[in-house]
Amino acid sequence: MEQPPEFAEGPDPEIEAARNSTVDQRVNNSNWKVRKDVYDEIAGDPQKLQQSDEMNEICGLLGKIAGESANGALLSALECVNKMLENFGNMELIPYNDIIHNSCNKGFGNSRDAIRDKTIDILLICIYEGHKEEVISELSENLGSKNPKIVAAALKALTKALKTYGTSQITPDIIIKVLKKPGLLDHKDINVKKEGKALAVELYTWIGNVVPEMLKTLNEQLLKDLTVAFEAVKGQDQPEPVKRIRSMEGVMIKEQDNDNGIQQQQQSGSSSQLSVYDFTAPQEVLSQIAGKQFNLFNDLKAEGKKAWEVKRDALEKTAKIIQNAGHLKEGNYSELYKALKVCVGDAQVNVQVSALNVFMRLCEGLKKRCGIVNQAKIMLASSVGLLTSKNLQLIRAVAPFLIVLATNTLSADEVLCDSTLNILHEKPNLTQKLQLFPVIKTLITHPQVIQTFSPIGMRVLGQHLVQVVNQDTDQTIRDQAAQVIGVLSQITGIDIIEALIKDLPVPK
């Protein structure tokens, strides 16, 4: 029922009186209703202030406004900040650090969704204006809060930032560090878990199957839960940034954010080659493997009956350090290369296998840098020689080793080169030849290896295989070669094999 005019609430006399004061006086007024009034006034028509003598003063007050202490005025305060940044965000006097900190401090823990969402809107504008680092730093601090509301809000902010600006700005390594925080994805609070999973799924829509690889250190149950969530969005169209940061506006399309090459690789059909390396900052590991608490090179000097165990354990620890880094920083790896070369020739199989594993992790982390290409060619010859071993564990270690070489450091042409394939024609060595055929088959059917296999390389392999079928005296060897020829024919087409057969000399 409408109140009679005589009982209707009139204008607040204190608010009316304050409107004759300066903006600074109104913002600092002890009455929160007076402060709310000026916030609403600014937000209602920010352009009106453009010619005002108080414009610079208002910009300087935005940090204080973002930290409004009265809950009744907070939403109006955040809306005021938001509107000012939308219209005048590139002004030099704006205290972005204070805005980012104060808005998160007051907004994220609030019980009202509208306030938390408005805080996120402000953070997105801050990123747009080039203050991504400050935003990420503040969000990281909030993720360590004991208040689940704050943690959930910070996660939601990251998800919205990723959705808005893409992985060129909110890079995958930022998200992965967050998702790996202990107790986050399995948090007791349902909203924190929900927002954590939403962040992981959003990243998956951008970079695909590399996400599970980057999160493989999580516990098995968490990985299963995430896999189900990933499957639900698998096959969706590649997302694109909704917005570009101010500094990128006006840049030619060819030079715009390319999301670390994600879209280009996916459009060219090679998205399966994406790995942890592509989305993480280089990490320094040499000091970790040769430090005071752990020193690989000292452990490799161990002597006595149990020396091999010390060496194996040290190599396994080194492999884990390198693998966790993902993307290795430039450095002098020569001492490590030399040590691994010695270990591959060790008398103990466990030491040899562990050394191969370390070198594989190096290939994944260095790709073609720091002299590893030449070292890979040396290790290639050593690994192929291991096929003569009678130890099944050692033989089984060769195929994955060659795959890693062919997908990271060398090409399939270089791995399946004449010096490797000549084993098929050397003096009778049935064991070595029989072990090489399944390795070749594994390599040429591997989806990433085949992309580094040139037509010339395929022809070279075909020539060797056809020669074995035509000349080898052992029926088992000839049958194995014929099987691999069949696989190669499916990949290259039958014409290349027919041409090779025609080129063979007629047997006498």
Image (tube, rainbow, N blue to C red):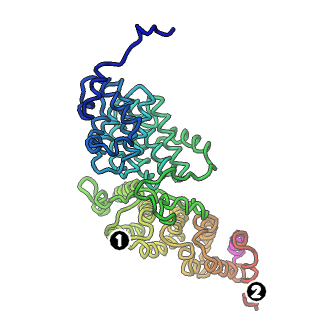
Q: What residue would you read off at disc 2? A: 502
Distance from the alpha carbon under mark 2 to that under mark 1: 46 Å
Q: Secondary structure at mark 2?
A: helix
Looking at the rendered structure, the kind of residue marked 2 is: Lys
Magenta highlight range: 473-484
Q: Say if residue 438 shows up in the picture.
A: yes
Q: Say if residue 476 shows up in the picture.
A: no
Question: Residue at 52% of width from left, 42% of height from top?
Answer: 223
- Neighbor class of circle 2 (other Cα within 10 Å; few <14, some 14-19, many 20+) is few
- Residue 470 is marked as none
**Closer to the observer: label 2 or label 1?**
2
Foreground pick, 414 / 64: 64
Q: Quadrant of residue 282?
A: bottom left
- Residue 338 is marked as 1
Looking at the rendered structure, the kind of residue marked 1 is: Lys
Foreground pick, 104 / 503: 104
Which numbered disc flags the more N-terminal residue, 2 or 1?
1
Q: Is residue 476 magenta?
A: yes
Looking at the picture, does residue 46 appear above or below residue 210? Answer: above
- Neighbor class of circle 1 (other Cα within 10 Å; few <14, some 14-19, many 20+) is few
Question: Residue at 31% of width from left, 69% of height from top?
Answer: 332
